[in-house]
Image: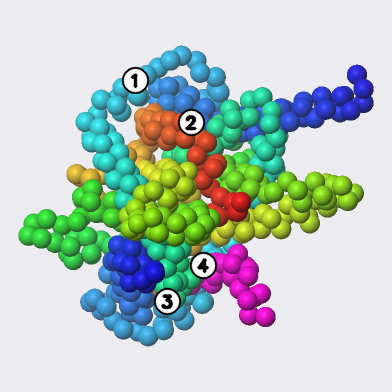
Amino acid sequence: MRNPRVGWALLSPTLVILLIFGFAPFLYVLFVGFNQWNVFSAADGLVFNGLDNFRRLVFDDDFLHSVGLTARFAIFAIGSEVVLGFVLAQMLTRDFPGRSLFRIIHTFPLMVAPIAVGAIWRLLVIPGFGPVPFFLDRWLDLTYQIGTYPDQALMTSVLMDIWHWTPFVTLTMLAGLSSIPREPVEQAKVDGANRLQVFWYVTLPFLRPVLLTTIFIRIMDAIRTVDEVWMLAGGGPGTRFTGIYIWRVVFPRTDYGYGSSISLITLYLTIVLCWLLFIAISGRRKGEVE
Amino acid sequence: MSRTQRQRAWGYFGAYAFWIFMTLLTLIPIWWMLVVSMRTRVELFGRPNLMLSRIYLENYSNVLTDSTFQRYMTNSLVVSTANALLVMILALLATYALSRYKLAGRDNIFFWLITNRMAPPAAFLLPLYIMFTRTFRIGNWTLFDTQLGLILLYCVFNLPFAIWLLKGVVDGIPIELDDAAMIDGAGLWGVLRHVIIPLAAPGLAVTGILSWIFAWNEYLFAANLTSVVARTITTALAEFVTVTGTNWGELAAMSMVTLVPSAIIVIFAQRYIVMGLTFGAVKE
């Protein structure tokens, strides 16, 4: 009754657009990644150099440093967003006066363009007229300068990301929480489970797919973050995440070959990480085999 | 007051204190931007004053009366709206295909679609630039610096997200409903129009809204693949940060202006956003 050809026809516009604007550039980057191509080098144009770029990046301290920073950024930011988002969503499931107002206010940051988020936070922390360094210095006697202290810059990026993306996590969690059936929760309570046990044994398993999907999306987006962090700190110390490092290699240094190979490795690492999560989300896969 | 009543009162008090605290945290950065947008350059320096001392609108009038700004704004509106509509249509068709037809390698196709969103943008700008300036060329016309170019390109990060969101929604619609409609003589379009679209409406709405917002907010591609004609509003924001010093007042004013359309959408579509963001969690 359902002819697969019709299915392919329905899928084809999507496939065509993604093949042209997603896959073709990928093939190009793949090709360039195995070449030396630097406007400033003696050789003109592309010179095939096999795996040299990849050998180089294994020993590139700047690259490894950027991976470490990105990992710290993603773990701190996403970890906090998930916990905070869950708490907020849990509180929003209860009915109380003013609930929808709080929800709308809380959704605002999600709608701000990343580049504007970067601008907003830069206005907050800029030395000279930003209120954050001023009050930290005055009340806590703390010198706060994201241009000078890498750790402060990293933590500011993390806070900015939390501010921007917690609403997204809250919304997906809220959707997930409201789809949990009531009976198992009530039943667990009747059986004498305390709040923690209800959360651990009933709520969490139901929430698992939504939770993992949310984490998946956040990881995917956090790794490729460029605009907002760039706007905040201009690629200063402590914020040289992989996305920004690639930018610096490709544009000011015009080292296209090397930049492409870093992109490929980053993309590869992201895909592996996300594939594992994807399998965890599908979950049933394992059950089918057994 | 009995003990439980007192406990409940404290619970309410705690919840409200928490919400007010969260609201302050959420709004202070935006409030500060509003304050900055209403100050002159000189007023900004010195002791930071979080209060709004006076209503000074010159930054806004400078930005809003600028013809370049108006063009950027129009471009952004056209590109985001067209992209959101295109993404909604394509994603619905693709999702329906992935959900209802036994296609070879269905799960792998689905995962591949998503990986399109993962690419770190910087290195991919070069092939896209070549593609936009040389590959797609008819006479003097190229895809570079056109609204069409951005509309198509934004599908690369919006379609994967949209398909993922809608997949759960369409999977949740019982296939028996399709079959029933087909027995009643509905063709493919009939099924889509009378069964899938009405039932998937909240999901479609949230897909459209989020795609619109992602397109509206996009910066890197717009900044590098347009030059004069098709530039969007986010590229203008970055242009305020110049070597000779940043005009923070106008930057803040323009950021406030870019917030408006998204804020309107959020307020009016709030209900759909929560209903639609389930990623397939709803199983009746």
Q: Which mark is residue B270?
A: none
Residue A270 has which mark? 4
Judging by the rendered image, the residue that carries numbered circle 1 is: B58
A62 shown above or below A81: below
Q: Are marks 1 and 4 in contact (CB under 8 Å)?
A: no
Upstream in sequence: badge 3 or badge 2: 3
Q: Residues within 10 Å of mark 2 (few under 14, many from 20)?
A: some
Answer few, some or many: residues within 10 Å of disc 4's Cα (few below 14, many 20 plus, some between 14 and 19). many
Which of the two marks, 1 or 2, is nearer to us in this view? 2
Residue farthest toward the bottom in the current orientation of the protein = A50
Residue type, mark 4 in image: Thr
Q: Amino acid at mark 1?
A: Glu
Residues flagged by tags 1 and 4 on a common chain: no
Residue numbers of the magenta segment: A267-290
Can you identify the residue that label 2 sits on? Answer: B267
Residues under labels 1 and 2: Cα distance?
A: 28 Å
Picture quadrant of residue A287: bottom right
From the viewer's perspective, is the residue at label 3 or at label 4 nearer?
A: 3
Q: Is residue A272 magenta?
A: yes
Residue B104 tag number: 3
**Residue B78 appears anywhere in the view:** yes
